[in-house]
Image (spheres, coloured by chain):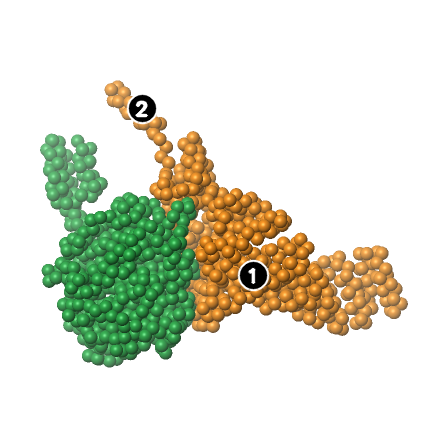
Amino acid sequence: MFTRLYAIITQHFVAQTFSLRHLRAQSKQICGVLVQMRRASCYKVATCVIIFTVGIGVLSAVQAETDKPLFTEVTAALGFPQMEASWPPGTHALPEVIGSGVALFDYNNDGALDVLHIRFPPPGKADAPAPNQLFQQQPDGTYVDVTDVAGIGHEGYGQGVAIGDVDNDGDADVYVTNYGADVFYRNNGDGTFALEEVGLSNEAWGTSATFGDYDRDGDLDLYVANYVQFDPEMVCRGKHSAPDYCNPQVFEPATDRLFQNNGDGSFTDVTEQAGVAAMSGRGLGVVCLDLTGDGWADFFVANDGEANQLWVNQTDGTFAEEAILHGLAFNAYGQPEGSMGIAVGDVNGDTLPDLFATHLSGETNTLYIASIPSVFTDMTEVAGFAGRDLRWTGFGCGFLDFDNDADLDIALVNGRVKRGEILDGADVGEFWNFYAEPNLLFQNSNQPSVSVVGARVPRPHGVGNPTPTTAENRRFPTAHFSDVSSRAPDFTERVEVSRGMAFGDIDRDGDIDMVVSSLDNRLRFFRNDAPPPQHHWLFVQAITQNRDALGAQVTLQTESRTLTGYVLPGSSYLSSSEPSVHFGLGTIDAVQTIEVRWPDGSREKFPIASANQRVTVYQGKGVSF
Amino acid sequence: MKKFILFFLFILIHVHGFAGDDIDIPQPADLDLVEEKLLLDAIEAAQEAVRNSPEDADVWGHLGHVYLIHGWEAPAVPCYRRASLLAPDEFKWLYFLGRLMKERQPEEAVKHLTRALTLNAEYAPAHLYLAAALRILGRLDEARQHLEHAKRLQPNNPFSELWLGEIALARQQLKLARTHLESALRLNPQQSEAHALMAQVTIALGDKQAAKQHAQAARYASQYSELSDPLWWDVLKAGVTASLYAERGRRYMSAGDYARAVAEFEPLTSQVQKDVEVWLDYGIALLHTKRYSEAFAVLESVQSLLRSDREVRKQKKSHEIAYLKARVYHYIAQIYYETQRTDAAIHTAQKAIRLLHNLVKKSQSPEGIRDSGHSTFLANVHANLALVYEDAGQLEQAIIQYQKALDLLPTEPSLHRDLAGVYWKKRRYAEAEPHYKIVVADDAKNLQAIYRLGLIFLTKGQYVEAIGRFEAVINLDTEYVNAYEALGIAHRKRGNILGAISAFEKVRQLEPDNKKALEMLQQLHEAK
């Protein structure tokens, strides 16, 4: 009898089924057993069982909160079409495994995020039409395909997308990279786009692209990362001699392009004179931000299988490649990696931008922490996720504070470029199952890693860089991350071949949602359900020249914390995210000021009344300091 | 009793069930894509061996090797695991299991490698891989300890120093990082990883000039990037694809075992007809085994492929083709030299030089090709051509070639030694002197160089310097008769009769019939 009772009780622990319905059923069973016992000790046991049951109830409540998925897939609920046919098998042509991007932006200025999906033809049918698709968010939150009305359905071999208002007319224009000639769409401001030749000519294999005002003249310039000079006739084989996708090193790198905005809506190719042509690389990702602390925008390019590039702005219209000097070219071992996606954010609260780059399996996804202004150190292993992601091949990625607890977490999507073992759950067709991998989600523990010597560097009040120290054994905080993938099963348990990834508050509920593009031209949307209600938030939209101030640094001052973010839609992989800066505030409910360092180097403070709102700040309307 | 019978039947069924089970042999998921019969046969043979001897750790391990070396890591894991269970005291299965799991499951790798090291604590690569796994897990202190251990076991392995430097850098212990990285660069000056990290360290320490130099050096690929791991040979030997035969051949070549290299390359010649690198290596291996006519034929066919084969020319970049052609000319020139065809050797080496000269010029331009090996190779070709001229008695030409080699590799001591030797032959002692000084600075035990420096000083009347050099030679080799003779002459010229007598007495002691020494002694005693 006791054995049976024990078995019933232990079921709770073994199965961890803590639903109330199940608990009631179990209690009935326990009572039944007790009735049969007819012993004096029955009362003692009953007391124990009651205490146990109450304990279980408390645990259930806690567990229910912990068990709540952090993200929920809402693709169908948002009205996106479901894929019916499976993606055709690959033909081992390299463009097939590069994938394409997705953009979250408000093309019609109605305050809601719309979606531009960059698409490409199926394997073996490079000339088949695969128009890009624009989906407009409706007042009820669902999406409708408005591609034809908007006139933005280019039918090239789509790769990446950059969003920026190049003519400062208050609406977002679109640049699409292709395996083939890229295209530029000017936003007409009436819900339609016009395909225009504005001097943005790039015939090479364009991948990621980003807008930024590198010359501080008030208009957006464009950097396009180009990949390789692909030869379709090249056949490559794996170690066991079966055909597989080629290493990019088999092909010559393609030179990236830099286009300077002429101020009249047209562009000039300044690649040669800016010095960017001096060194070609196999570029897949690019961001435009001041990474050297001098107030001028630099370009960081993630290269595949070779040293990354950091084009440091010389402030005279030219750039010098200094990735090695700044610690961003290689990993901690001094070795180049297959870099794909890029995330930028301040993960350790020192107001300096840190970088994260996704890589091939067998290589870490690398976290570069700015140890002093402009010098980065690979702190991947100290940060704690190296042991979790070495198996996977990462692409789209981003720093996001998914739980609004005032520190930046990491989400990334995976999928191989070489055939590997078929993982449980892979169901993307016989051919692609060999390439499918699950995605990952890491949570920032908001605690500096213990393995860094000493305490945090004192940070001067306000926006700016910490006082650089040149002494031996310099000390700086890093961050530590925990793998919480199991708590976001919709996002992480599906085994697919994912590539692009964009971030934004799609449902306008104060947290960051995600959209992922896959190798089969599929989009998946993930609603963020992670933040507990007691966590506060703030969105800041920084406007200059009638447009989003790409490259601006936004810092929140609260009584207890300083939080830094960047207006940086052009990051991740081939994708573009919401340009507003999101801050999770944790339990902080009052923000003292918003400080903005604008792309032209000037600084302003703005007062802020409360949290849990979307705030727009305009250059020239704040208090300079 | 009833319960007992039921229990007995239960056990019986289970035992029978196990005995009747097929052995669960891991299979690569995409085996059906493999077309190469040799590989399919190798897999079948390895699997068959497992079926025949399922309790034999070695056959499981071999199956793991076959999978691993051909790119199937996932099915190799259970094979090594089974091998390590069957032979729990065998180091290598735990080692391979740990090494393989380093990136897949570093916690498991740490467990296996730690256990492996309890069986053999002296295998340096196991310490290095364990350190790598620990680093992945952020356990830097433990990683550092194993790196220190590996350093003690293999003091010449630059990876221990490199990774110790990296750990120090991660902790912002910049001066310590610099010390380790300097050591790594002493062990391998061409290790780009160490240069890359040094660039970071030096810029953080405020030395931007040094940082730029290291950054520049880091742009070139390392001369080698693999850990020295003798056990890996066991895995490599399980390879049956052409590329693995070639890899084995190259490894034998780099170990100087050309006969074995030839044996690895030979079966390939029918399979990889268009792989010019394999053919070139085969030719070089034949040359080193003195099979000159075969080497010549192979190298000629490589040249023909490079010249006119469309497929080969399409696969290679123009500068790669030029470099390969230059290498072929260089080795053909060596064959001519070895077979006493001096004019042909000179003519062919000059062809190689022309091609390499253009490549070096291109690599020095800002948008140049990234390969630091061209100038080193060009220096070698010049030096070899100098040797040909020297042997042919054309010493002026030899001097020119050595000088060109030194322009490219100004710090290479062997070039200074050889050039000084030619000057010596030409009796151009003043020109030989600076080169011998460099040789001695590099190798303080080079008797010939020290002795000749002494003679040069003697002819210049710098007797004190000369005496110092001769005494240095005698300190290194107490039976170096010529040094005693020269020392005696130097003392005599300096007026030190007793010192001269002492030196010539030593000559007579070593060579009792040395007439010159007897005459000198007689003269010295008369002059006393």
Quadrant of the frame with the C terminus of chain A: bottom left
Q: Is residue A40 above or below residue A390?
A: above
Q: Is residue A176 visible?
A: yes
**Element carrying mark 1:** helix
Residue hosting label 1: B377
Q: Nearer the viewer, residue A481 or B283?
A: B283
Chain assignment, label 2? B
When asked about the image quadrant of residue B415, the answer is bottom right
Closer to the eye: label 2 or 1: 1
- Which chain's colour is green? A
Label 2: how many residues lie within 10 Å, few (<14), some (14-19) or many (20+)?
few
- Type of the residue with mark 2: Leu
Image point (17%, 55%), residue name:
A80
Residue B431 image position (x, y, % from top left): 69, 71
Residue B422 location (% of width, % of height)? 69, 65
Residue type at the position of mark 1: Phe
In the rendered image of the structure, the colour used to display chain B is orange
Q: Nearer the viewer, residue B361 or A328?
A: B361
The residue to which callout 2 is attached is B12
**Residue at the image position 32 percent from the left and 27 percent from the top:** B17
Farthest residue, direction right: B526
